[in-house]
Amino acid sequence: MATVLIVDDDIALLAACRVGLETLGHRVRTVETGQAGLAEAAVHGPDVIVLDLGLPDLDGLDVCTRIRTWTDLPIIILSADSSEDRKVEALDNGADDYMTKPFGMRELDARLRVALRHHAADDIGHVTELTAGPLHLDLVHYQATYQGRPLDLTLKEFDVLAYLARHAGKVCTRRMILESVWGAAYANETHYLKVYAYRIRKKLHDEAGQFLQNDPSVGYRLAVPPAPAAG
């Protein structure tokens, strides 16, 4: 059972979500404005947030970005806008998933469960730093350096590198990366990964793909020097 905060100005949708999700075993809190959502998230600390983009007082992306300054709890965007640009923008601003209206209650429940599983998995071991060759990642402050110089990464770019750094030297399939960083619903959205790999390489000045390598038939890996042999 999870506590779900839903931020949306559609009263009918809020009522339907409350009934549907409580029937499925969740606790549900609802608010109708961005400011109220920020206050509710800060004071009551839900397990997951479902956030509409078209709020009457604040842009939902601004709400998402502000929440990300103090917590990494899962945020699922709910929007009538199905454009790819809007989805990428939301994911870059810290959202964990993106659903378009109209939607089914079982789908929403499934997305909630996936987001909560990913969040729980991230907490296991509580690793705070990762190093893969010349790449160093501070997972607490979302700061990255490459060859000693700071990198200006979006949240999703950072998450892609963090996933690859956890498996440095190993090829990670496109599906594995997409499911880990974007969620199970994005397992087949390989164009997302191509765009992000291109953007990350530009920021690394690794346009030739010597560090962030691509196996066209499988996926991506970070090339790191092998550990020295013992003795």
Image (cartoon, rainbow, N blue to C red):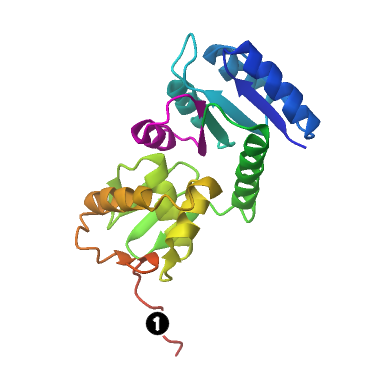
Expressed as whole percent of the image width and height from the top left, the position of residue 96 reads 51, 39
- Residue 88 within the segment the image draws in magenta: yes
- Residue 161 within the segment the image draws in magenta: no
Q: Is residue 214 above or below residue 127?
A: below
Q: Is residue 4 left or right of residue 51?
A: right
Residue drawn at the location 29% of the way across and 47% of the way down: 150
Q: Is residue 42 above or below residue 58?
A: below
Residue 183 visible in image = no
Residue drawn at the location 46% of the way across and 56% of the way down: 177
Expressed as whole percent of the image width and height from the top left, the position of residue 25 reads 80, 34
Count residues near mark 1 (Cα–Cα under 10 Å), then give few for <14, some for 14-19, many for 20+. few
Pick whichever, 54 or 31, lies toward us.
54
Expressed as whole percent of the image width and height from the top left, the position of residue 113 reads 67, 43
Residue drawn at the location 52% of the way across and 52% of the way down: 180
Expressed as whole percent of the image width and height from the top left, the position of residue 69 reads 49, 30
Task: Give amino acid for label 1.
Answer: Pro
Q: Is residue 104 left or right of residue 135?
A: right
Picture quadrant where residue 146 is located: bottom left
The residue beneath circle 1 is: 228
Picture quadrant where residue 209 is located: bottom left
Residue drawn at the location 25% of the way across and 49% of the way down: 203
Pick whichever, 81 or 89, lies toward us.
81
Residue 180 visible in image = yes
Q: Is residue 41 above or below residue 220?
A: above
For this orientation, the residue located farthest to the bottom is 231
Q: Is residue 31 left or right of residue 229?
A: right
* Dot 1: element: loop
Q: Is residue 211 left or right of residue 96?
A: left
Q: Which residues are magenta?
A: 78-99
